[in-house]
Amino acid sequence: MCWWGGGGGSRFPRMAPKRTVLHGDLTPVRRTLRIELKRTSDGRPSLACVRVDGTRTWARVHPFLPTHDLTHCAVESVLGVDDAFFGLIAQGWDIDDFASAGVVKRLPAAALCVEQVVGHIERAIAVDAEALAEALALEAARTGRAPCQAVRDDQLAAIGRLQGALLEAWRATPPGETLRITFPVAPPPP
């Protein structure tokens, strides 16, 4: 079960039919994805995602987006969410699908919750679990959507550590080079 306790949302027809891969012992394993963020010489980075089956999706992105995407990586990894940005790409969505008309209506509830958490972290509203819970409750009341499950203090701390490590790695990536990350990522120890 996902961290927010829900699911739902329409799916794109080309998405993989299952979000969990089962091995012989029937232990669920999260889908993995290789994230490649290239720092280009013209200042407009590119994001490529390579799925386990070798298929890929990529796009040139706004210079702001690598930090946003790395925050997504941290939140989705720590909370174990498979139905948000990187999890959906691992399932078969393309990066451009997220910019298509009406996409919000097709996104699973988890993707909307993760986007809210990411936004609150980026705007420094999520100073602790209580502040984040209040912000998520206000957002749910404003939008009429079901509230997202609260994020615990230890999860928020792990997200912060992982986000910091990912952003540091991105800042250290020189022009012309690529930062490669295997999603999901384990957070560094406290």
Image: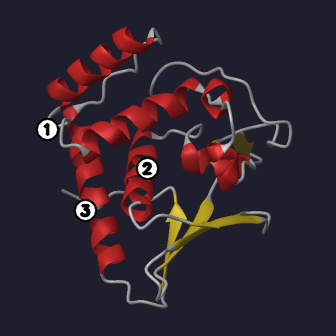
Q: Is residue 127 placed above or below 170 in the rendered structure?
A: above
For badge 3, the amino acid type reads: Gly
- Residue 114 seen from this side: yes
The quadrant of the rendering that contains the N terminus is top right
**Residue lying at 34% horizontally and 66% vertically, measured from the top left:** 166
**Circle 2 is placed at which residue position?**
72
**Circle 1 is placed at which residue position?**
127
Q: Please state which of residues 155 and 134 is positioned toward the viewer in this rendering.
A: 134
**Residue lying at 23% horizontally and 28% vertically, measured from the top left:** 132
Q: CA distance from mark 1 to mark 2?
A: 17 Å
**Residue lying at 66% horizontally and 66% vertically, measured from the top left:** 58
**Residue 164's disc number:** 3
**Residue lying at 37% horizontally and 53% vertically, measured from the top left:** 71
Across and down, in percent, residue 78 comes to 39, 46
Across and down, in percent, residue 94 comes to 71, 53
> Label 3's element?
helix
For badge 2, the amino acid type reads: His
Q: CA distance from mark 3 to mark 1?
A: 15 Å
Residue 148: image quadrant is: top left
> Label 2's element?
helix
Is label 3 in contact with label 1 (beta carbons under 8 Å)? no
- Is residue 99 rendered to the left or right of residue 179? right
